[in-house]
Amino acid sequence: MFEHHQRADLLYPQITYCFVDPAQHGRGLGSALVRWSLSLAQAEATTREDKRLKVVVKCFSRNVAGIRLYTRAGFKSVSEENDETVNEKWAVLELIL
């Protein structure tokens, strides 16, 4: 669920494949997972000389609830990508801490 991408100027963690069973929606589990992922990213950033942190999440564009979840957590929409392997579009959101 939590991957790392390194760039010279930023620690670049990415939240991937974060799902909550639809039967469990509305209980705060998605928000808790996002907070936990961000705490992992922040903890790792504190070990670096350059403490800037950007976290990226990709969410299917049709996943309105997921996009709303990340937006409430402070993520901003930055682009959209096509994924031809699954014939879907991804909304790309990022948060800079």
Image (tube, rainbow, N blue to C red):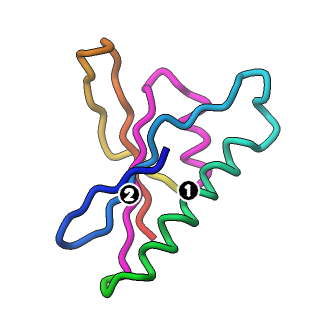
Q: In the displayed image of the protein, which residue is found farthest to the left?
A: 8
- Residue bearing mark 1: 37
Mark identifier at residue 13: 2
Whichever of labels 2 and 1 marks the residue nearer the N terminus, that label is 2
* Above or below, comparing residue 50 to residue 97 in the picture: below
Query: Which of the image's four quarters has the C terminus?
Result: bottom left
Residue at left 26%, top 15%?
85
> What amino acid is found at the position of numbered circle 2 in the picture?
Pro
Q: Residue 12: horizontal and vertical position, in percent? A: 32, 60
**Which is more toward the observer, 71 or 29?**
29
Look at the image and say whether residue 15 sits in the magenta stretch: no
Residue at the limit of the structure toward the right, as seen here: 27
Left or right, 33 with reference to 57: right
Looking at the image, residue 14 sits to the left or right of residue 81; the answer is right
In the rendered image, residue 61 lying in the magenta stretch gets the answer yes
**Pointers 2 and 1 in contact (CB under 8 A)?**
yes
Name above or below for residue 26 compared with residue 75.
above
Q: Identify the residue at horizontal 53%, vertical 25% (top origin).
A: 63
* Residue 11 screen position, x and y as percent: 32, 67
Taking the spot 53% from the left edge, 64% from the top edge, the residue there is 40
Q: What residue range appears in magenta?
A: 51-73
Compared to residue 59, the image places residue 5 above or below, namely: below
SS type, badge 1: helix
Q: Residue furthest bottom?
A: 49
Disc 1 packing (10 Å; few <14; some 14–19; many ≥20): many
| In-image side of 28 versus 79 (left or right) | right
